[in-house]
Image: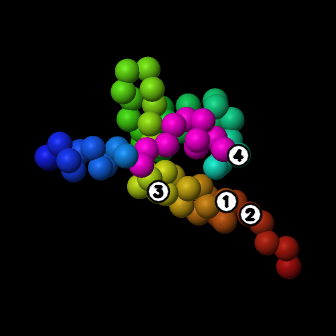
């Protein structure tokens, strides 16, 4: 992968703080999803970054799970 392409890929990464602003979830919940592999992330030094595609996948899976567990009233 060329350096230019590599730089472009990480230009739009979210920090942990950015993601928590978008999704109302505790730090512990994010950590659990990271450890389970459900929320893919990059660790560079001490910083955790999320690229848009894994975030979108995670949000879709959360929405699908929410739809499955929501009970419908007759």
Left or right, residue 56 beside residue 71: left
Left or right, residue 68 beside residue 58: right
Q: Position of residue 62 (x, y in %)?
A: 59, 55
Provide the residue designation for mark 2. Answer: 70
Give the magenta range. Answer: 12-21
Find numbered disc 3 in the image and state the secondary structure of the residue it sits on.
helix
Q: Is residue 61 visible?
A: no
Q: Residue furthest front?
A: 4
The answer to whether the residue labelled 4 contacts the one labelled 3, judged by CB atoms less than 8 Å apart, is no
Find numbered disc 2 in the image and state the secondary structure of the residue it sits on.
loop
Q: Position of residue 15 (x, y in %)?
A: 51, 37
Of labels 3 and 2, the one closer to you: 3
**Chain-order first, disc 1 or disc 4:** 4
Q: CA distance from mark 2 to mark 4?
A: 18 Å
Q: Residue at x 45, y 26 (%)?
A: 47
Q: Position of residue 13 (x, y in %)?
A: 43, 44
Against 69, residue 6 (above or below) is above
Q: Residue at x 85, y 74 (%)?
A: 73
Provide the residue designation for mark 3. Answer: 57
């Amino acid at each position: 992968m060329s350096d230019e392409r590599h730089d472009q890929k990480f230009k739009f990464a979210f920090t942990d703080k950015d993601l928590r602003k978008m999704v109302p979830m505790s730090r512990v919940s994010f950590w659990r999803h990271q450890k389970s592999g459900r929320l893919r992330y990059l660790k560079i030094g001490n910083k955790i970054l999320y690229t848009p595609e894994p975030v979108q996948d995670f949000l879709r899976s959360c929405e699908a799970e929410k739809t499955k567990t929501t009970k419908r009233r007759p």
